[in-house]
Image (cartoon, grey):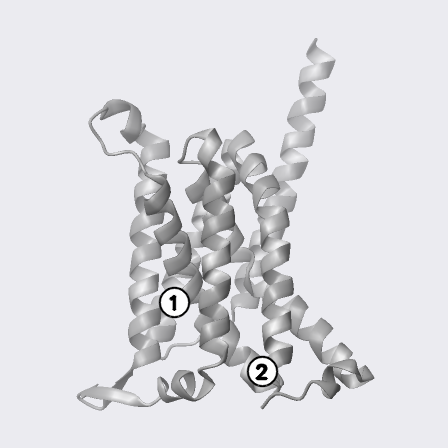
Amino acid sequence: MVDYQEILTLSGLISLLTLSLLEVVLGIDNVIFIAIVATKLPKKDQAKARAIGLSLALVFRIILLFSISWIMSLKDPFFHIGSFGVTGRDLILFSGGIFLLYKTTVEILEKIYGGAAKNPDAKALTLRGAIVQIVFIDVVFSFDSILTAVGLVSNVLLMVLAVIIAMIFMLLTSAWVSEFINRHPTIKMLALAFLILIGFILVLDALHLHIDKAYIYVALGFSIMVELLNMSYRSNAHKRNH
């Protein structure tokens, strides 16, 4: 239901702020994935991949928001495997989780063993390929955030505005996150480990084994804080020795 006047009320503005913050928090894993994919491209294409990928993802999210009844129908079983009812949402989350696990595992192995350097014939990631990956993983992440949004508010316009605000935040921060992750290899490995966990959570969620992602966010935040302290220690130690 679209109620334009509700947005201008105090409760409407509070709902918009709450939903926007929620979308930003739920988009952290998305920003990290985009940052890692973008760093695989030549410098001149990185900003373009982020901008085009996120813009297309925004369009898909808005389309999904105006297809709420279809989204909700994805929670109904398509078929059964024994007593387990497989829904459309399960299939989307499972495919997204497997893709994320595969993509992140390959990236980790490349970092550890230098796969790209050892295999000069390996196909480089193209701009189009990066955009497709960004859009695909964003659509997968969208289902959880949209279903969460539906549980909080019923005004579609509020949801659309919250998604737009979150996407603007992603556009503004993705370049900084990409540069920061690329500059600090240990942070990049932490980010990849985080994406592995998110991939497992998506697969488990598809199997109806729900794990609260808040635990993962707290663990990531704590790990990054410890690594920042280590970076500060190494930097000060280097200055003292020179």
> Nearest the camera: 192 or 65?
65
Looking at the image, residue 29 sits to the left or right of residue 40; the answer is right
Q: Nearer the viewer, residue 170 or 222?
A: 170
Q: Is residue 218 visible?
A: no
Give the secondary structure at mark 2: helix
Who's the residue at 52% across and 48% down the image? 51
Query: Could you say whether the residue bearing mark 1 is in a helix, strand or loop?
Result: helix
Q: Image height check: is 240 above or below 1? A: above
Q: CA distance from mark 2 to mark 1?
A: 25 Å
Q: Which residue is mark 1?
A: 202
Q: Position of residue 70 (x, y in %)?
A: 39, 85
- Would you place residue 126 above or below residue 157 in this image? above
Crowding around mark 1 (Cα neighbors within 10 Å: few <14, some 14 to 19, many 20+) is many
Give the residue type that dot 2 points to. Answer: Val
Q: Residue at x 57, y 46 (%)?
A: 174
Tell me the quarter of the image containing the N terminus: bottom right
